[in-house]
């Protein structure tokens, strides 16, 4: 994990069916996307988002 995310001691990860749809829902609810969506080979897609209260969450869409 990059140092930029270490200010928050715990990051909750949520498994989602459609990461792009959830990203749009986060933005629509006043949250933000913290990095570009990336792919972990043989695992799936991941991205960090912040909710409207500033909490950092990880999203993962398995392959």
Image (cartoon, grey):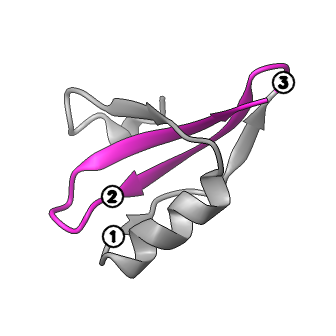
Q: How far apart are marks 1 and 3 (CA)?
A: 27 Å
User: Mark 1 or 3 closer to N-term?
Assistant: 1
Give the structural element (helix, strand or loop) at label 1.
Answer: loop
- Residue 15: % across, % down: 52, 33
Q: Quadrant of residue 30?
A: bottom left
Whether the residues at callouts 1 and 3 have beta carbons within 8 Å, the answer is: no
Alpha carbon separation for disc pair 1 and 2: 5 Å
Camera-side residue: 35 or 52?
52
Q: How crowded is mark 2: few (under 14 residues within 10 Å), some or many (20 or more)?
A: some
Q: Report the disc number at residue 41.
A: 3
Q: Which residue is denoted by mark 1 in the rendering?
A: 31
Q: Residue 12 carries which label?
A: none
Q: Is the magenta stretch mostly helix, strand or loop?
A: strand
Q: Is residue 43 above or below residue 27?
A: above
Quarter of the figure with the C terminus? top right
- Outermost residue on the front side: it is 17
Q: Which residue is the extreme one toward the left?
A: 53
Q: Which of 5 and 58 is in front in this view?
A: 58
- Range drawn in magenta: 41-63
Identify the residue shown where x is 21% and y is 37%: 8
Q: Residue furthest right?
A: 42
Question: Do callouts 1 and 2 mark residues in contact (Cβ within 8 Å)?
Answer: yes
Which mark sits nearer the N-terminus, 1 or 2? 1
Residue 44 percent across, percent down from the top left: 74, 31
**Mark carried by residue 50:** 2
SS category of the residue bearing label 3:
loop
In percent of the image, x 35 and y 41: which residue is there? 5
């Amino acid at each position: 994990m990059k140092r930029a995310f270490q200010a928050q001691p715990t990051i909750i990860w949520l498994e989602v069916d459609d990461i792009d749809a959830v990203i749009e829902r986060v933005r629509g609810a006043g949250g933000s996307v913290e990095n570009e969506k990336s792919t972990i080979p043989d695992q799936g897609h991941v991205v960090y988002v912040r909710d409207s209260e500033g909490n950092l969450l990880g999203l993962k869409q398995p392959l």
